[in-house]
Image (cartoon, rainbow, N blue to C red):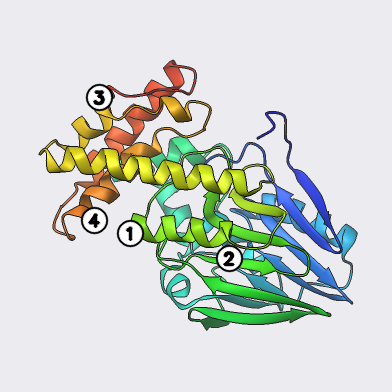
Amino acid sequence: MPKDFKTGLESLGNGCFAWIQHDGGWGLANSGLISDSGQSLIVDTLYDHRTTRVMLDAYRDVHSTGFDVVVNTHANGDHTYGNDLVHGARIITSRAAAEDMPDPTKRAALLRDWEAHGHYGAWVHETYAEMFDFEGIAYAGPTETFDEETTLTVGTRELRLRVLGPAHTRGDLIVYSPSDRVVYTGDLLFADAHPAIWAGPVGNWIAACDYIEGLDVDVIVPGHGALSDKTHVRAMRDYLVYVRDETRARYDAGLSEADCVAEISLENFRHWREAERIVLNVNALYHEFSGGTHKTDKDDLFRRLRAYTKACACCGGHHHGDTP
């Protein structure tokens, strides 16, 4: 990933665009626009009104006839909270994503009273409060859902929407334009950043990487990070396989989550952002390996996530283990 990539509109050719947010960290998601013959489709909105308005203004510079469709690649708020600014558009997502789509008014309420929510509230405040304003955002959920796969037409262009979750979340989907050799992956791909397994199972995410790598594409628009290609997909798959195998060995040996996290070296991924997500990923894998019986105290999980984040900051962003 180029270290100096900036927030802005990237033309992919033939009416395909990507809105890329620097530096792709927590909450700084990407979006896409596909425009053809006066029709348009937006892939994902952003985390608050300020960032979404800037993006929509840039989209209007290249497509002036309004926005017809929004496709949400999954339920997370940094890909959906701006939906309410795309007035009159059809909003389409997978059935599972629709079921999980969060209400932004709850995020606003949490930040108003974050101190009452322990380490989780503190983490949300530390991570998002300075960058985003969640006040005044109205919930705008999907108007249409689908299972497995569907096809949409934008002008003369056929787009294929395929559900590849559960993986990052339960309802992950991709938007693929075969004629343009472009795919928008949502958070099935983090470019040069550690992923976060909110749902799993990890095997599904590995299979999703294999599916994306098998597509006939030249450009891949990740959910976070700079424009990508298949090398980033292979790197994501390698990370998931590595973390799965390293965690499995320690789970089978009876180590605690915390001890497992402390032992796993991330040296081979030292240039990736958000190394603290290993805390979340080990937690998800312990839950998966136990068949769902492994229980986690949410406050302790986010205590450990905050501790790892602080350790990363002390080590220049590349903490590799021994976290409290």
The answer to the question of whether label 4 and label 1 lie on touching residues, with beta carbons closer than 8 A, is yes
x%, y% of residue 186?
57, 58
Res 22 label: none
Residue at numbered disc 4: 288
x%, y% of residue 85?
69, 66
x%, y% of residue 261?
27, 33
Q: Nearer the viewer, mark 2 or mark 3?
A: 2
Find numbered disc 4 in the image and state the secondary structure of the residue it sits on: helix
Which of the 4 quarters of the picture holds residue 106? bottom left
Residue at numbered disc 1: 201
Find numbered disc 2 in the image and state the secondary structure of the residue it sits on: strand
The answer to the question of whether label 2 and label 1 lie on touching residues, with beta carbons closer than 8 A, is no
Judge by depth and name the residue closer to the eye, 210 or 166.
210
Find numbered disc 3 in the image and state the secondary structure of the residue it sits on: loop
Could you tell whether 222 is left or right of 297 in the image?
Answer: right
In the image, what residue type sits under mark 4? Glu
